[in-house]
Amino acid sequence: MRRFRPRFNLLRSTPFRLALTFAFLFVLAFVLSGAIAYQLMSADLAERLDESVRDTFSVVAATYAEHDLEDLVAAVDSHSKLSTKKEQLFSLTGPAGDHLAGNVTAAGLPDGFSMFNAALPGVPADTMYRAYSGSVGGNNLTVAFSLSETEELETIILMSFGWATFIIAGLAVTGGALLASRVQRRLDGIAATMVDVSHGRLDARIPLIGNGDDIDEVSAQVNAALDRLSALVEGMKQVSSNIAHDLKTPLNRLQMILEGAADKIASGQDVSDELAEARAEGLQINETFDALLRIAQIEAGARKARFIDLDVNGVVKTIAEIYASVAEDDGMSLSAKIFQGAECQIHGDWELLTQMFANLVENALRHCPPGTAIDLSVTRQGNRIVAEVGDNGPGIPAEEREKVFQRLYRLDNSRSTPGSGLGLSLVHAIADLHGASIALGDRHPGLAVIVKFPTSMRS
C-alpha cells in the first residue's frame, strides 16, 4: 500500500502566508505610526529649538542699556567664547553692517527666524543653523543654534525605527515559518489518516493534541465521522452476513417448493398448494428486503424533509387505540398513560413515529405469553420527553439487549415465531433520525423500551 509522504512547501503553506500577511500589516502599521511619531517629535524638537534661540536672544538683548553698547558687546562676546565648537553663533553688527562682536558676522538676515549655512573653520560645510535676528538699539543682533544635535537625534530615532521594523519583520517571518511547520505536521497527520482510510484502514484516526484549538475541533469531528463510517461499513458487512445466513433458509425452502411443484406438474398432479406456499415465501422475502431498504433510507436522513411539529401524546394514543383490541384477542392487556401537562411537542415524522411504537407493541405481542400486561407511557424529564413501552413478559437477557438492534438478528427462542429480525433495527433507525436515545431496561420481570426525545429538534 502506498504510504503518504508529506511534502512541505513553505511558500504554499497557509499558516506561513497568514503569518506573512499579519507581519506585513503589523510592519505597515508600525511604519505609519512611527512616521507620525517622528513628525510629531521633529516638530516638537524644532519648537523647542526655536524657544531656546528666542530665549537666548532675549537674555543677551536684555543686557543693552540705552546709549550704552558696552554691556551688550560684552554679553555677546561672553556667550561666543562659551561655544567653542560653534554649536551656538552670536553676531552683533552696527547699522552699517560692520562687525561689533560675536563669533560670526551675520549681515543681511531678515528679522525673526531664518535658516542659514555658515562656512566656519572646524564646522562641516553642510551644517545648518536656526537663527533669530532683531534690532537692539539700532544694531542688529543675531543668535543661531546648530541643527546638528537635532538632526543627530532624528537620525537615532529613524535608525531605531528601522532596526525595530527589521527585527519585527524577521521575528514575524521566523515565527510564521515555525508556526507553519507545526501546523503542517498536524495537517500531514490529517492527510495521512485520510489516505489510510481511502486504502481501507477504517480504524485510522487523526491524532489529537488535546489543547482544544480549531484544528483539534475539526479533527475530532472528522474522527467522529470516521467512527460513524466505520460503524456503517461494519453494519453493512454484518447485514450481508445476516442476509446470507437468514435468507438462505427461506430461499432454499422456496426452491424446494418450486422443485416439488415442478415434479407434480410433470406427473399431472395439482400444485395449487405449492404455489400458494411459494407465494407466501416470496412475499416474506420481499417484505424483508423492503424493510432493509426502508431502514437504509431512514438512516440516510431522506425523511427529514417531512418533519413537522407534533405531539408524542397523540402518537401514543393512536397506537393504544389500534392495538388494545388486538392485545385483548391474544389474551393480553394494553394500557396507555399520557403525560397530563404541557404538550409534549417534538419536531418529527408522524408516520415513522407511529411505525416505531407499532413495532414495539407488535414485538411485545409476538413474544409475550397470554396474560401479559403491556404499558405505554409518556412523561417529561426536564427538556426531554420520555416514551416507554413495557411489559411483564419473559424479557431479553442483558447480554442480548444490544444485539437485538442489529439487522436480521433474532434470539434463539424467537426463531420459531414469524418475523424477519428487522423490527427493532427499524425502531433504532427511526429513533436516531429524531435525535432520540433508546435503551432496554429490565422490569423484573419483563422488558422496558425507553425512548428519550429532545423537545427541540429543528436543525
Image: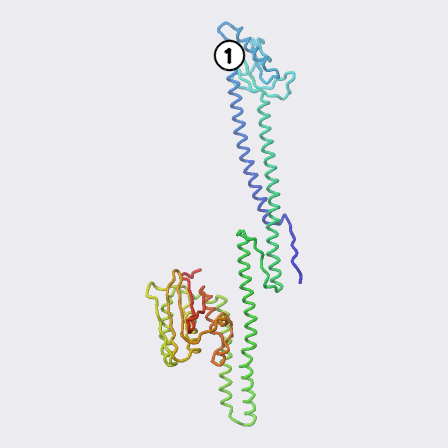
In the image, residue 290 sits, relative to residue 130, either above or below, namely below
- Against 399, residue 33 (above or below) is above
Q: How many marks?
A: 1
Q: Residue furthest front?
A: 444
Q: Position of residue 361 (x, y in %)?
A: 41, 74
Q: Is residue 64 above or below residue 197?
A: above
Q: Is residue 93 left or right of residue 369?
A: right
Q: Position of residue 266 (x, y in %)?
A: 56, 93
x then y, percent, for residue 264: 54, 92
User: Which residue lies at the image location 49% right of the left edge and 83% below the top edge?
Assistant: 280
Residue type of the residue flagged with mark 1: Ala
* Colour option used: rainbow
Residue at far top of view: 67
State the residue lying farthest toward the left: 340
Quarter holding the N terminus is bottom right
Task: Indicate whether 112 appears above or below 333.
Answer: above
Question: Quarter-wise, where is residue 341 in the image?
Answer: bottom left
Does dot 1 land on a helix, a strand or a loop?
A: helix
Between residue 208 and residue 136, name the one nearer to us. Answer: 208
Locate the C terminus and report the quarter of the image it occupies. Answer: bottom left
**Which of the 4 quarters of the picture holds residue 342?**
bottom left
How crowded is the residue under tag 1: few (<14 C-alpha within 10 Å), some, or many (20+)? many
Q: Which residue is mark 1?
A: 61
At 61% from the left and 46% from the top, the residue drawn is 178
Q: Whole-percent x and y of residue 438?
A: 45, 67
